[in-house]
Structures are given as C-alpha cells and as structure tokens.
Amino acid sequence: MEPHEEIRYLTHTSALMKPTSQSALALQPFETALGEALFAQLQRDSSRLGISMRAARIEELSCRLLGLTRLKGLDFEARPSLAGIETASGGESDFEPHDYLHLVPQEIRRSLGQYMTPRPIARYILQAAGYRPTKDLLARTLCDPACGSGVFMVEAIRTYLTSLREARVPTEEWYPKVREHFVGIDVDPIACLYARFNLSVLLASAVLSWMRANPRRLPDPLPIHEGDTLSSLAVELGETALLDPRTPEIRFGGAFDFVVGNPPYRKLARIPLELRRAFADSIYGHPNAYGMFLHAGIEMLRPGGRLGFIVPRSMLSGLYFQNLRRMIEERTCLQEVSLFADRKRVFSRVLQGTMILVFRKRGCGEGENRQVRTAIIRSNSELENGGPLHVSPKASQVARRLNGTTVWFVSDQERTYSLLDKIVDRHPLLGGPAVGCPAKTGPIVWNRVKPFLRKGGGKGTLPLVWATDVGRFRFSFGAAGESRPAFLAETHETERLATYGPSLLVQRVTADEQARRIVAGLARLPDRKYFVENHLNVLQVSSKALVDLRFLLGLLSSDVVEFLFRSMNGNTQVSATELNLLPIPRGRFESEIIETVELLEDAAAEARDGLEQDLNERVARAYGINGSDLRFLRKTLSGEILSDN
C-alpha cells in the first residue's frame, strides 16, 4: 500500500477551526513523500546547473524549504515511490502544482469548503486583477490568504519570475525577492506543506543559484505561514482576545498590492464573538467564510490595491450578503464580475455556482468608477483562449439600489443592461406599499413539527402545503402522495404558524438548469386556514392594497420576470427578499393579464403555448418593452443569443 493510502485525514481547511491534536501524526507520511521528492528534484537541478552539493547539504536545504526538522526514517537518498509526486523536468513554465485533496473524502471537503482551483482560473484571475509581467510588478506585494496547496502563488510567482528575467535581475537575487514580495497563509498544516513543496520545485533553480552565491548559508524559509488569516486580522483590528501563538509575525492590514485566491465556501453557524465584532460591518445573519475573507481582503489591501477571488454567486442578491455588497461598493471600485455558466465543471465532482470577482480598493477621496467588465464564462477553455467576451456597462447598471438594498446584475450582453433600465427603474417594487403584497417564507420547517404530521385529515388538523404541490399555473394538494404527510395537527405550538386566506405560492428552491427559476401557483384549498412549509414563498395581499394575485402570478410566470430574475440571482434559492425587490408595473394592463392567467389555469395542453405567448406580450407592454426587446430576451433565455460580440 502506498504511504498516502494509509492516511486517515485528520486536519482541516476552514480558517475558523483549530487543528486537531492528531494532525501532527497525519503529517508525517506527507512530509516523508514530499521531502524525498524535493530532494530528488534539487539533486537533478544542481547537477544540471553544474553546482556541486553534497547529499547532506541538499537534505538540509530540502528540510529548510519545507519547514521540516530531520525526521527519523526519512530516506532522502531514495527515489520517491509515491505516485503523483514526481516533479516536472520541463522548467518553471511547465510545472503543474501538486495537491492532496483527492485523498480527502468528498464529504469532508464539502463540509470545510475546500476545493482546488484549476490552473487556468488562477491564471485568469491574476491577469484580470492586473498582475502581469511588467517592470513595476517587481515592487508589488501579493498575498493569498487561504493559499491551500499554492496554486495561485505558483502562477503569480511564475509571472514574477518573468518580470525578473525581463529586467535582467541576476538569478541569485530571485529567491530573496520572492520572499520579500509574497505571502501565503493557510490554517491547514498539510496545505502549507504542499504549498512549500510546490514553490520549492518552481524556485529550485533560483534557490540553487542563491546557494552558489552564498555557499556557507541556508536560505530563509519560504513565505508560507500556517495560521488563521481572519483571527490574525482581527487581532490587528483590536480584538486581542483572539491572539494565537500560531499567528504569523507579519502585519496584514494595508500591507499588499494584490490579494488573490479561492477562499473556503461554507456557512458558519457559530463564530467567536471577537471575530463577529471584527467583521461586523460585513456580516448579516449567518456569515459565510468566503464573505469574511472578502472583508479581510479589503482590509489587507493598500489604497489602489486589487483583489481577485473566485467565490460563489450567492452574494449577487442574497439578503445575508447585503452588508458585504454595501462595503464593497463603498470601499472599492468594482472592476470585473464574471459568472461561470455551468455549476458542474469548475471544481471536480462539485455542484457549485461560482463567479470571478475583481475590485480595486479606493484611495482617500476617490469617487465612483464608471464601468465594470462583466461576462458569462461558458467553459474553462475560454479562459485559456484569450478569455471570455466581456461587455463594459456603467457601474450603476451592474450594482442597482432597490429599496435601500443593492443587487448586482451580470450579463455578457450590452442590450441586457439597457433592457434592465426599462424593467427595473420605472416601476414600484413587490414588497413596497404601492403593490402591498410582500413575500415571506413559509413558516413550517417539517422536521421541527414532525410529531404533529398526519397522513390523513381529521379533527384538529389543517392541510399542509408542500413545494411539490405547486407547479407552473397549477396547484395540486397532496401531489407527493404518502411520501409527505398532507396534514398537520393544529396545537398551541403550531397554530401561530398557520396561513389564512388566499395566497400565491412560489417554489423557493430551483436551479439554473431548470426551464423556469420562478415556479408559481395559486393555492386552491377549501379551508381558509392551512399550513405552508418553508420550501415555498407565500404572497398575500395586504388590507390596504388593491392588487389581484392572478395579476402577480402572470407577471412572475412571464419571460420578462424570468429574464430579470436570472440576471440578478446567483444561487438555487428564490428568496422572499429577492421577490420583494421585483418591479411590478401597475396600470391599464392588469385586467388583460388577469384574464389570460384565468384561461391558462384551466387550459388544455395544446392551448397553452398560444396563451403563454399572449401573456408574455401583455406583460412586456406593461413593462414598456417593445416586440424587438421581447424577442431578444426570449432568445437569451433559450440560449440562442450567447453574446453581442
């Protein structure tokens, strides 16, 4: 059995978790394999460069670069037997970083938000953030605050070495300059070990050249630190209670020209009070680790510095990220927001909607930026062939303020933004007083009321509506059959959760791959009192509003609102917050839309296409959209229009 196959994964990646006491035991097989592989690489390179070094000296160098002491049983003279650790011999441009995540059970990787970034994405993000080989780059500093195995740092240093070469800097000076201008940090000791290994292989020739110029010395360790970025920054922000002996002795605040990376993605139910205080300006409700890393990135940048991250798309419009969006808008200038169209192909065996986010930290007194680059990335290969086709709308067309909340709209078509101007800016919002039909989440969480669920009705029970009961223009109570109990006992614990009167129900969980993101139907129950589970949103007319639920059903089921919602939503949730931000056109078209919806609800299948065409044309007129715009947005929804360019 190979050494890695014997390892039970005992460490972690989240920057909000401390290592287990057994992590050090899990490290040794990794140290052995990587130590032997690096020794072999340095031995080959020293021979190639004509540098005479004893094996004992190469052993010392390997340990110094990997941050190791001499380990008992480590056979530096042996060729590494571990598959996948062989190093490339084609030079720095061909070197592919090694990683260990394939050894970690997928459920652990998912729970810790731990994914390796494909090299083309790392390279693209660096370029999008302006990290390119120029003479000015030699003085710039870069940090990856959750560096993992060092994919971003390898790509950045590769670019930096090109700049050194073009500036004719002597090779023996390269390694000290890299140490001076780069910092990587990760809480996972195995990740740090792999990052040091990858950088050591990339810099092997530079290190050996330095050794030839300094034969009596060993180089200082690589700039990879094991520690917690968020806690370290919290210390600098005044939360000294989080001081940790593992905290690197470097300052993060305002220290870097570039902050890049792929932070961990996961919700954090509980975080230390000190950490919540330090990041209070960006947190709303339950924080997500990547949101806190975005906040940290802003703090870490110098004025004018740039951040480039790959992060989930959920921050585009979600309620929990409203404070983070506001902070980004107030303290930075958005430069690029590019969405990955396919949730399945970015990270291996992971279904995760992601986007590339690039911004520049504002200096004192700096005003708004005028334009933002936006794109839809349909494959990773686009990133290797000149990048996706971008458009450059005004910043105010991307980040739009609706009822005090900013929502980000992303497209790769200029016409989309002019069309959104017509839809968004001229009409009152669903949750506002002019419409008076605010959406809310269904209050029944089934596993919390499990003892009160009933398969059959009877005295003391009320109907329980599930998401499966709601379809497009339809409602079928009990559609799930016996798999979901259709009734709930009305007790003193559940009675306050009941819904009264007519309601429009909207499914809360839909995905980009579905034909429709908004799936809505009118509740049809003989009882005026019933329960609604929390995978549905509930819309009910307030006592002061004069609006028909069928009118709202027609709007929500139209191509116009589908197009609008897909432009602003970044995840699989159709939240009540987002529904309440939808613009609703009031006026003379309401009765026509209601009439069409009534026909659709009872129409045979063969008549539905024509009626839906009528509905879309009437909704378009209500929004002030002409026939050409309607055809454009319908082609966009169908995928016929991929880009204006």
Image (cartoon, grey):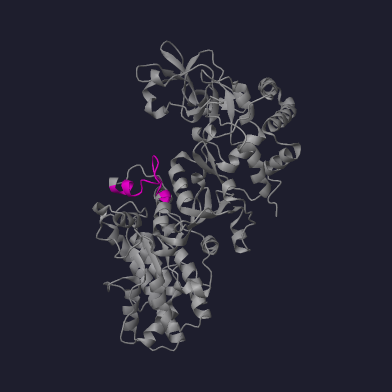
Q: Position of residue 441 (x, y in %)?
A: 47, 29
Q: Is residue 281 magenta?
A: yes
Residue 267 sits in quarter: top left
Q: Name the residue rendered at 72%, 42% in the picture.
A: 632
Q: Position of residue 226 (x, y in %)?
A: 32, 62
Vertical placement of 54 versus 150: above or below? below
Q: Name the residue rendered at 44%, 12% in the picture.
A: 458
Image quarter hosting the N terminus: bottom left
Q: Position of residue 413 (x, y in %)?
A: 66, 49
Asked if residue 223 can be seen in this view, the reply is yes
Vertical placement of 197 versus 10: above or below? below
Instruction: Work out whether residue 45 or residue 339 is closer to the camera in this orientation and state it.
Output: 339
Could you tell me how many numbered marks the image carries?
0
Answer left or right for 285 relative to 433: left
Q: Name the residue rendered at 25%, 54% in the picture.
A: 240
Asked if residue 81 can be seen in this view, the reply is no
Extreme residue toward the front, this view:
365
Q: Position of residue 309 (x, y in %)?
A: 48, 56
Image quarter hosting the C terminus: bottom right
Instruction: Work out whether residue 249 or residue 456 is closer to the camera in this orientation and state it.
Output: 249
Vertical placement of 123 versus 51: above or below? above
Residue 373 sits in quarter: bottom right
Q: Which residues are magenta?
A: 274-291
Extreme residue toward the top, this view:
459
